[in-house]
Amino acid sequence: MNVSKVTEDIYQLSVNVEDILFEGLWEIPNGVGMNSYIIKGEKTAIVDGVCGWDGVPESLFKLLDELKIDPKSIEYLIINHMEPDHSGWIEDFKKIHSDFKVVCTQRSADLLEAFYDHTENIIIAKDDFTLDLGKGHVLQFVEIPNVHWPDTMVTFDTLTGTLFSCDAFGSFGKVDKDNYDDMLTQEEIDFFENEAVRYYSNIVAAFSIPVKKAIEKCSTLPINIVAPGHGIVWRKNPEKIIEDYARYASYQRGPAKEEITLLWGSMYGMTEKAVKHSIQVLEDEGIKVHVHRVPETDWGTILSSVWVSTGVIIAAPTYEYKMFPPVAAALDEIGKKKVCNRKVFSFGSCGWSGGAQRELKEIVERNCLNWEFLDPVEFKGSPGEEDLELIAERVKELVRQVKLTVNNL
Ligand code: FEO
């Protein structure tokens, strides 16, 4: 729970959340920061009041108290996006204060009624709508639909050049009072870069085309500071997170980095034997590899790796005439995020019937992923020397193709 000054008249209130599944689904091993912002002109606005997890909004009220802001003095509640992690406190807020106006898009207004039955004093913000808070703080609103829900907009303070970007340019990872890029070490910035990839690939990835459009739309704004709803504030180098997001969006169609993700599962150690052999070959080839066994590894971690990898290796045995179910389930999730145009090699123990490779093709085709496959290697039972040699050969060919693809950009 932190309160800090972003810039003149603008403050951040942030609350960390951990030990939950984000959206009820995604593991967040390093937690997540939930950020609200106060803009104090002659009138006061709060942007994105955070939700009711773990002591919020009481903690948010406590932070307001630290700033000597009476919640009753807040005239505008700006909702950039209605997902309850940003809007969930409105019902509690109404218990102590009723005379406020909501500023949001029409789509948010519809959701506001559906979620909280709130229909009063709503100002609909469309592109280029402005709101003057006094003391020079004229707020401009820009709709960025589908980053991450259709209702989303960003709020821009024209005086300070602060972009309140909500889910856009956000990251996972707990934050503290020094959660500003100009106050962090390079190591800490790197940590948040990894957390941004995790956040992007888990939460925003499916909306990569809208992300590109949003970046283009926001490029007309003279941005000095990026203040997202999750993660750190970019004051020194706001271009970095915008460029990072443009890069992450481009990874959906590929190519991504010169890296390979090896996704695997094994029942009795036979496919595992070939996996260990492949890892050795990959290490000898000197390429960065992310190895994830399922069902032990969560989907969010797998997606983070696949998103940045140009090459993918799928190692799975056949199970009841189909692919080993945990691998198929992870692939389905990868399919929903539309991780396209990867170089792929697959292998596994085919038992008495085969079926894993067929299901792999079905998942890839059903999700229109356009993956380019090397010939798979299947072996009955445990892989023999010839199988392992063939697998090594294909793994080396995959590495060659990945390097060629990435370096021919
Ligand atoms: Fe952080 Fe889509 O809510």
Image (cartoon, rainbow, N blue to C red):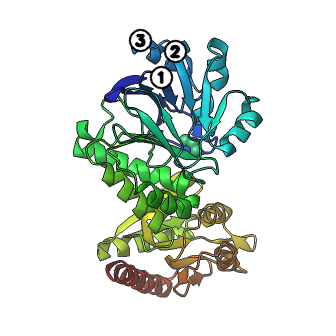
- Indicate yes or no: mark 1 CB to ligand 1 under 8 Å: no
Q: Earlier in the sequence, mark 1 or mark 3?
A: 1
Residue 89 appears in the picture as rendered: no
Among the 4 quarters of the image, the one containing residue 164: top left
Vertical position of residue 254 compared to residue 132: above or below:
below
The type of residue carrying mark 1 is Thr
How many numbered circles are shown? 3
Q: Residues within 10 Å of mark 2 (few under 14, many from 20)?
A: few
Select label 2 or label 3 by which is in front.
2
Among the 4 quarters of the image, the one containing residue 138: top left
Which residue is disc 2 drawn over?
73
Select label 1 or label 3 by which is in front.
1
Vertical position of residue 86 compared to residue 365: above or below:
above
Q: Residues within 10 Å of mark 1 (few under 14, many from 20)?
A: many
The type of residue carrying mark 2 is Ser
In the rendered structure, the answer to whether residue 224 lies left or right of residue 303 reads left
Disc number placed over residue 68 in the picture, else none: 3
Quadrant containing the N terminus is: top left
Q: Are marks 1 and 2 in contact (CB under 8 Å)?
A: yes
Q: x%, y% of residue 244?
A: 37, 57
Which residue is disc 1 drawn over?
44
Q: Residues within 10 Å of mark 3 (few under 14, many from 20)?
A: few
Dot 1: element: strand
Q: x%, y% of residue 308?
A: 43, 64
Dot 2: element: helix
Q: x%, y% of residue 56?
A: 56, 22
Residue depicted at x 38% and y 54%: 242
